[in-house]
Image: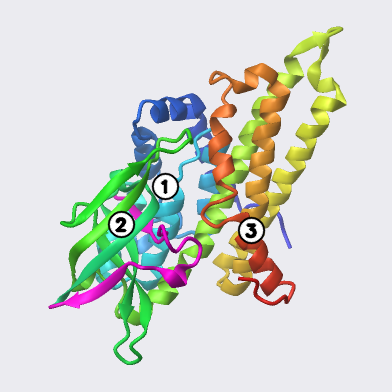
């Protein structure tokens, strides 16, 4: 057992850290508040190969795994630039395509995902289904040699930045008559696909949308994989990478907040010339948050290692635990940073309150803490299913 990164992973961490710090949180916030996207950072990360670290080399990627992509997510977040589309495009879409796409689909999309010139977003959540994907109402029906898609999706990230959206729909199984999941690569400019931006209380350059699919026609090769049988495995293929990279982004955000607060409290002097950080009422909460973040990082490392080893079931347990731990730790770290900075903590200048909305959302999405506890109770503790 080792907790050390390989030399290549260490180099990746250092390089991504340097890139993130060159842009920094002020860049991230300025883009968010002006309604712009982090286009420059994304493009440079793509050119340097960081967006495609988990994509096979034959498609222009780095040939690594989710461990390497988690490093990218964490270090950019630790620099104050938590990019949500890293989770959506390289982690979910690229993984699903690599594992279950046809060769034509891989050749068409993976090189662009690797160099950052293409983004594919993911649409599963629906207003009526919530966490229960068995109740998905978006339906795909055969139409000649293609498909017709109808339904609604909500909280879909980055549709305005992407060329395609990977839509999870239900199709009818001709052998059983039952509806089964399938994934479709739908161009974001497809006729019948419309969107409405959601106003969110989160400082982020990445927007959330409602999607409406009204008789959206796509060709036969828009179906991900060789057949409908690829649907369920493809859907689940993206879940562990999603949880692991979201957790990595949360851990990085927690590190960023603790670093900002520690720098401030080590130099801020109010009582008798001593730094406020010398008082346990200030230092202990920060130390406690630092412990929680480090514990989350260990679980992220375990989950990523299991996933890259092909141990999907174990990675599912560890990935859910990592996501839970990192969500709680990030929220604690940012809230503690705001508290120890006092009034300064609520200003834009000091760059911690700007993350409150994002870390609070991290306890809800992409899977809520309560659903993770349900999962652990059932699959780890052997309890009856509670929902």
Give the colouring mode of the picture.
rainbow
- Where does label 2 land, which residue? 165
Front disc: 3 or 2: 3
Residue at (41, 57) in percent of width and height: 127
Could you say where residue 371 lies in the image, as x and y percent from the top left? 61, 62
Judge from the rendering whether residue 154 lies leftward or rightward of residue 72; answer left or right: left
Judge from the rendering whether residue 387 lies leftward or rightward of residue 57; answer left or right: right
Which residues make up the magenta segment?
117-144
Q: Quadrant of the N terminus?
A: bottom right
Judge from the rendering whether residue 222 lies leftward or rightward of residue 356; answer left or right: left
Q: Is 97 located above or below residue 277 in the figure?
A: below
Q: Is 131 located above or below residue 385 in the figure?
A: above
Front disc: 1 or 2: 2
> Which numbered disc covers residue 370?
3
User: For this rendering, which residue is in front, 330 or 52?
Assistant: 330
Check the image and name the residue furthest to the bottom: 175
On whether residue 27 falls in the magenta region, the answer is: no
On whether residue 128 falls in the magenta region, the answer is: yes
Disc 3 or 1, which lies upstream in sequence? Answer: 1
Could you say where residue 15 lies in the image, as x and y percent from the top left? 51, 39
Could you say where residue 183 lies in the image, as x and y percent from the top left? 33, 69
- Judged from the image, the secondary structure of the residue bearing numbered disc 1 is helix
User: For this rendering, which residue is in front, 236 or 245?
Assistant: 236
Could you say where residue 250 lies in the image, as x and y percent from the top left? 59, 45
Q: CA distance from mark 3 to mark 2?
A: 28 Å
- Judged from the image, the secondary structure of the residue bearing numbered disc 2 is strand
Check the image and name the residue furthest to the top: 272
Residue at (64, 49) in percent of width and height: 326
Label 1 with label 2: CB-CB less than 8 Å: no
């Amino acid at each position: 057992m080792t907790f050390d990164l390989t030399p290549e992973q260490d180099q990746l961490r250092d390089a991504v850290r340097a890139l993130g710090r060159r842009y920094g949180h002020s860049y991230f916030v300025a883009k968010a508040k002006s309604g712009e996207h982090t286009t420059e950072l994304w493009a440079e990360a793509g050119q340097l190969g960081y967006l495609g670290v988990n994509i096979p080399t034959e498609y222009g990627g780095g040939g690594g795994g989710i461990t390497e992509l988690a490093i990218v997510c964490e270090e950019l977040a630790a620099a104050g630039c938590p990019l949500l589309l890293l989770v959506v495009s390289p982690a979910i879409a690229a993984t699903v395509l690599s594992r279950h796409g046809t060769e034509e689909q891989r050749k068409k999309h993976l090189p662009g995902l690797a160099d950052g010139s293409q983004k594919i977003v993911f649409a599963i959540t629906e207003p009526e289904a919530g966490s229960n994907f068995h109740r998905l109402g978006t339906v795909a029906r055969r139409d000649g040699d293609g498909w017709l898609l109808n339904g609604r999706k909500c909280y879909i990230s980055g549709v305005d930045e992407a060329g395609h959206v990977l839509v999870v729909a239900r199709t009818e199984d001709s052998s059983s008559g039952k509806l089964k999941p399938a994934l479709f690569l739908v161009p974001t400019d497809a006729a019948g696909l419309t969107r409405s931006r959601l106003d969110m209380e989160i400082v982020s350059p990445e927007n959330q949308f409602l999607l409406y699919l009204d008789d959206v026609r796509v060709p036969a090769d828009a179906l991900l994989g060789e057949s409908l049988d690829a649907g369920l495995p493809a859907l689940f293929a993206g879940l562990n990478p999603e949880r692991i990279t979201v957790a990595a982004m949360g851990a990085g955000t927690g590190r960023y907040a603790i670093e900002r607060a520690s720098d401030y409290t080590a130099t801020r002097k109010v009582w008798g010339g001593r730094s406020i950080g010398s008082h346990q009422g200030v230092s202990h909460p920060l130390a406690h948050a630092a412990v929680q973040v480090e514990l989350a990082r260990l679980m992220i490392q375990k989950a990523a290692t299991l996933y890259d080893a092909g141990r999907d079931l174990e990675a599912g347990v560890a990935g859910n635990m990592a996501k839970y731990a990192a969500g709680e730790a990030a929220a604690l770290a940012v809230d503690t940073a705001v508290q120890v900075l006092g009034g300064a903590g609520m200003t834009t200048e000091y760059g911690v309150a700007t993350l409150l909305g994002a870390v609070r959302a991290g306890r809800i999405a992409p899977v809520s803490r309560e659903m993770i506890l349900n999962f652990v109770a059932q699959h780890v503790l052997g309890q009856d299913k509670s929902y």
